[in-house]
Amino acid sequence: MTGPASGTQTSDAVAPPPKWLWAAEFPRALWGLVSLGFARRRLTDGVPRGDGRPVIVFPGLANPDRRYRVICHYLNALGYDARGWGLGFNLGRRTIGPGSERLDALIRDSYARAGQPLTLIGVSLGGILARLAAHRHPDLVRQVITVSAPYAGDPRATNVWRVFEWLTGEKVDDPAVARLREEIAAPLPMPATAIWSATDGLVSGELCHGGDCADIEVRANHVGVQNRPEVLRAIARILGGAR
């Protein structure tokens, strides 16, 4: 669901991001927080207001919901009903269940509580799992937005595939994982948008968008991408355009 090392060419001719982008990830993440501070008062200017629809935010690899408080607060301030997924740290199938049982329950319970189809927003591995949930429950999901989520190709076109294997216990060469990737990358039956960056230091931007959905390119790093002002405003515009 996400992983040769930086600079190694993958079988489909997509390479991981270069080492200099990888090394710059954390300084750029710090700058992203600074830019958020400067832009905070202008984030809601000129963007559509929400209509109360339910939104679930899926966290990235090894991330908990609290890392996504900014995006949830932002969307709630616009008038959406946004919340984290409530499943704890995202460790792939260790978290959602080997047959995605906990993920399935999340979607069904959230739909029952809201009384209407859900909008799923997923960052990195969270975007991959959001697509999985949408495929499994097409009648319960209204829209999917992925952010820097490498769903559309060889997971080795990233600089984190070995970390993914270590944290999740999944092997990217496992036939079961490969079949799951094929399911996730298949075209979605509902509106979907992929936000991606060609300057991502952890995953190749080419893996983060595909022909089945609209896409928006931003200039951003990977760590903390959900806090970037341009990403937040892009999400607000996407939601506002899907009435």
Image (spheres, helix red, strand yellow):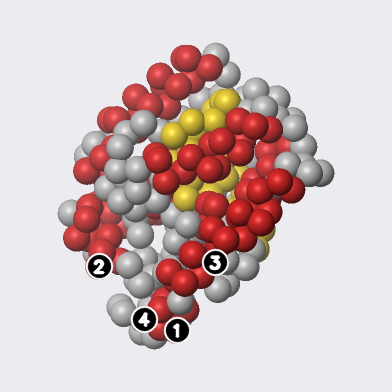
Q: Hey, what amino acid is under mark 3?
A: Trp
Q: Nearer the viewer, residue 163 or 27?
A: 27
Q: Are marks 3 and 1 in contact (CB under 8 Å)?
A: no
Q: Hey, what amino acid is under mark 2?
A: Arg
Q: Which residue is mark 1?
A: 20
Residue sitting at x 61%, y 38%: 74
Residue sitting at x 25%, y 67%: 162
Instruction: Point out the tag, 1 or 2, that comes first from the N-terminus.
Output: 1
Q: Which residue is mark 2?
A: 162
Q: Is residue 3 left or right of residue 204?
A: left
The part of the image, by quadrant, that contains residue 76 is top right
Q: Nearer the viewer, residue 5 or 65?
A: 65
Q: Is residue 30 left or right of residue 154?
A: right
Instruction: Assign the C terminus to one quadrant of the image.
Output: top right
* Tag nearer the camera, 3 or 2: 3
Q: Which residue is mark 3?
A: 31
Q: Are marks 1 and 2 in contact (CB under 8 Å)?
A: no
Q: Are marks 4 and 3 in contact (CB under 8 Å)?
A: no
Q: Which residue is mark 4?
A: 6
Instruction: Assign the N terminus to one quadrant of the image.
Output: bottom left
Instruction: Point out the tag, 2 or 4, that comes first from the N-terminus.
Output: 4
Q: Note whether residue 143 is visible.
A: no
Instruction: Point out the tag, 3 or 2, that comes first from the N-terminus.
Output: 3
Q: Hey, what amino acid is under mark 1?
A: Trp
Residue sitting at x 34%, y 24%: 105
The part of the image, by quadrant, that contains residue 18 is bottom left
Quick check: 89 above or below 107?
Answer: below
